[in-house]
Amino acid sequence: MNFAVLQFPGSNCDQDCVQVLRNVLGQSAHLRWHKEKSLGGADAVIVPGGFSYGDHLRTGAIARFSPVMQAVRTFAAQGGPVLGICNGFQILCEAGLLPGALVRNRSLQFRCEHVYLKTLTSDSPFTQGISGDQLLRVPVAHGEGCYFADAATLAQLNTNRQILWRYVNARGEADEHANPNGSLENIAGVCSEHRNVAGLMPHPERASEAILGSTDGRHIFESLIQWLTSRKAIQAA
Amino acid sequence: MTEPVITPELIQKHGLTPDEYRQVKEILGREPSYTELGIFSVMWSEHCSYKNTKPLLRTFPTKSSKILVGAGEENAGIIDIGDGLAIAFKVESHNHPSAVEPFQGAATGVGGIVRDIFTMGARPICAVNSLRFGEITNPEVRRLFSGVVAGIAHYGNCFGIPTIAGEVYFDKSYEGNPLVNVFCLGVLRHDQIARGAAKGIGNPVFYVGPATGRDGLAGAAFASQDLTDESAEQQRGAVQVGDPFMEKLVCEACLELLATDAVAGIQDMGAAGLTCSTCETAARAGTGIEIELSQVPQRGPNMTPYEIMLSESQERMLIIVKQGREAEVQRIFDKWDLPWARIGTVTDTGRMVVRNHGQIVADIPAKKIADESPVYQPEAREPDYLKQVRAFNLSQVPVTRNPLGNLQTLLAWPTIASKNWVYRQYDHMVRGNSVVCPGSDAAILRIKADCLPGSANETTTLKADKFIALSTDGNGVYVYLDPYEGGKIVVAEAARNLACSGAVPLGTTDNLNFGNPHNPELFWQLRESVRGLAEACRALDAPVTGGNCSLYNQNPSGPIDPTPTVVMVGQIEKPEHITTQWFKNEGDEVILLGEAADVGDPLFGLGGSAYLQCVLGQKTGTPPRCNLAVEKRLHETVLSLIRSGWVKSAHDCSEGGLAVTLTESCFSQMARETPRYLGAQIDLTAFSSIRLDALLFGETQSRIVISTTAAHAEQVMAAARGQGVPVARIGLVGGDSLRIATGDGALNCRVADLHDLWWNAIARAMK
């Protein structure tokens, strides 16, 4: 598959995503500069982590105006899969492609550590084949990852099963101690109503090689690759 | 605008002595202008010129077959790591700015050292820091501590560099004068080494990065004075403000530009800003340089030449471009939306000529100001307090009756306690190369193809990933109590940490944090500790590739403990040699390499120990001795055992002694709020001739605790004996408690309880 990994000024996990997609998972992946107006025929878009525009004004608030984001909007509207990681999640929320917002961690401190994630539904391109019992050990690294949405939005997210991942402890329970940032309902990642756009604060690309201590993050990319493969097969048929 | 008249008071205010001023006049053949006075003042500050330390620094071993760029040549040293690749690294202090404004002081420290590394043409791939603060119980200390940590986190995280290792000590002597030593390492191909030289007569000189403001005026000179309440207040304007986002853009743009081969020379504007970068590049190339200040982007109106030349506004670079290649520079900097300006030309006059709207405001021989700063050999005298230190003996110390209570106290002592409160605020995993994260003896980083800066010809491809290990150390209390032995231990411990992780040292960068060099007792501390550092670097094959001196560290109640810190970098041959400090499996054998205690030391390793300090409230006694031949043999032995595949964990004995080492070996961290505990049953009854406090908490040097499978234990014993290293089987891994049996009874505690004290101590103190 062909992945476009967006590159904004201040992106710093862009290269990490390319490394995993290309060298670990054997996909085609290329960086897409924010001033580009097209996605170069990509099958999927990754909006990577980092500090786009130095988090000036608000995380993701400036990046959403970059020319490439218009192409991402169009791509998403046509059902193309878009995954935002960390700052990418923040950008997608600012761009209105995902519900809710990410605010300052409740500790008021940046947090970098491994967490456990529980996958709540396999009904999305990013969670196919990931069972709820199979906890994912993946690192977080953010200062503003506290997921917030109003009560109506939260209710809707729950009803539509748009919450893809929650922070849990080693026993799979979404308790307060497992939550690194104070997110409502321990929400770590959500998807759009049409399920083709998703965002999460943890970094699956940092948990995709055994030498880095965990390969659990690979499941998310592999799910997406599998989804793209079967869609291609259907389109071909 | 009229410039101030130069008076003796003005000269003194600029930190120049009457003799130095005479030398200025001799060099110029006339009285200096106000701008020139400012230029000499910063260039001849200790921070830029090393005028009080140069003769000492020359005693460091600085050569090895792997050193490609040596100490003092450029902005950072460079070492070969094989296959045509190299690493550039250096440590630098930002102590005074951090005392005044902890967040920006520390943040800009990171910014400065990161720039030093990409200036060399290397892509920065990790950061390390070494910090010192007063007692954490003091609210003002907590303010400084949290500010510094947040500042480092802010800059490093946003720039996107993993802060992968560090250390923090808390001691009253640093109250009001914290130490903030920051380190950066980058990677590059041999043919990508960039030079800070203004080569090529007629080449244009470019200024790149944000506009010059009045921030950070003469910061280098400020860093070269005693820090007092008054100076701190007056000098608040000398602290710069950092923008890591800008730095990220400047770094990416510079690396992209360097790959085009359009650059003749490059230098960052760090300490002494435009002044230092222009005269140093000209001095290195043996050329001259002429700049026009009206072309320099300026943040404020009506800036004077003096202000423009001395500003330390951050994230600025000076680039000497090959004639005819200007368009490439413009294209790349426009792509990254970065300000740039052509401000001057390389000349053949050997002079640094500064004009403002055409009028000459400074005209100085570049080589003379850069290389011929005054050099002093300050007077040194052994301090009086050492008599008392040496008189201390154990007859004054009752043997402990509560070893478990002592162990618990030590584990919760902030200097020993886990630093997770600190490193969880740093992104220590970005770039996906952090193989061993903070929390083990040394951090380990992978170097893979995407770590390299871009290259037009891609001459070198990375055949296999490489692995480097990093450790930073510097026990200032030992150095205070015995500068020479303490200096040796600083280096020995760093090397030992590398050995425990499976690495062989490549080189060392040092940061000398000391008091006023004009105080003979303080200069003696400096001289003696450098003697120890140099001897240990030589003995352990870890040559010095550069570093930094920070003198004048003191607070109203006195000087800081003399604190040389080092960051040592080593290489690990194969990934299977990567070793961490925590126990791995139930049933493994625990083996002590080295003596249970140094019986030739009248204090058995308790002098200057954490035990004496935190349990008995005494900071005294001659610290443990370090026999470098013994140390070297130990490192070689543990490395050969690791390479044999027999070592499951290795952890060195340092602060808190054997008991703390064993306890820490029982912990590892799986995820947030999810520690992994693995207890051990330890039997030290064979050592009952040693005083209990010395056996458990003594800090005898040259010791490592390893674990191995029962099947390999005998081979390990035989191999160690064969290499002349004392060795003892001291127990088994297993269970959920740590039990240590001694000739004076056993101590026994649940690992979870010990972990809670150790892991949460700093968070509790910061609440």
Image (cartoon, coloured by chain):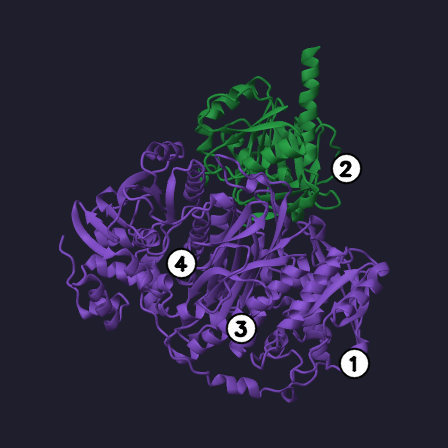
Chain colours: A green, B purple
User: Disc 4 is attached to a residue of which chain?
Assistant: B
Residue occupied by mark 3: B532
Q: Is residue A155 visible?
A: no
- Percent x, y of residue B13: 25, 67
User: Disc 3 is attached to a residue of which chain?
Assistant: B
Instruction: Pick the residue in front: B613 or B325.
Output: B325
Cα distance between the residues tagged 2 and 1: 52 Å
Q: Evaluate whether label 2 is on the same chain as label 3.
A: no
Residue occupying image coordinates x 53% and y 73% = B532
Q: Outermost residue, top direction?
A: A237
- Asked if residue A22 lies left or right of residue B77, the reply is right
Instruction: Pick the residue in front: B627 or A21.
Output: B627
- Asked if residue B300 lies left or right of residue B55, the reply is left
- Percent x, y of residue B315: 38, 47
Query: Is mark 2 in CB contact (under 8 Å) with mark 3?
Result: no
Q: Which mark is residue B688?
A: 1
- Percent x, y of residue B150: 49, 53
Q: Evaluate whether label 3 is on the same chain as label 1.
A: yes
Query: Nearer the observer, disc 2 or disc 1?
Result: 1
| Amino acid beneath label 2 | Asp
- Asked if residue A65 lies left or right of residue B541, the reply is left
Say which label, 1 or 4, has the lower sequence index.
Answer: 4
Query: Is mark 1 in CB contact (under 8 Å) with mark 4?
Result: no
Residue occupied by mark 4: B101
Secondary element at tag 3:
helix
Query: Is mark 3 in CB contact (under 8 Å) with mark 1?
Result: no
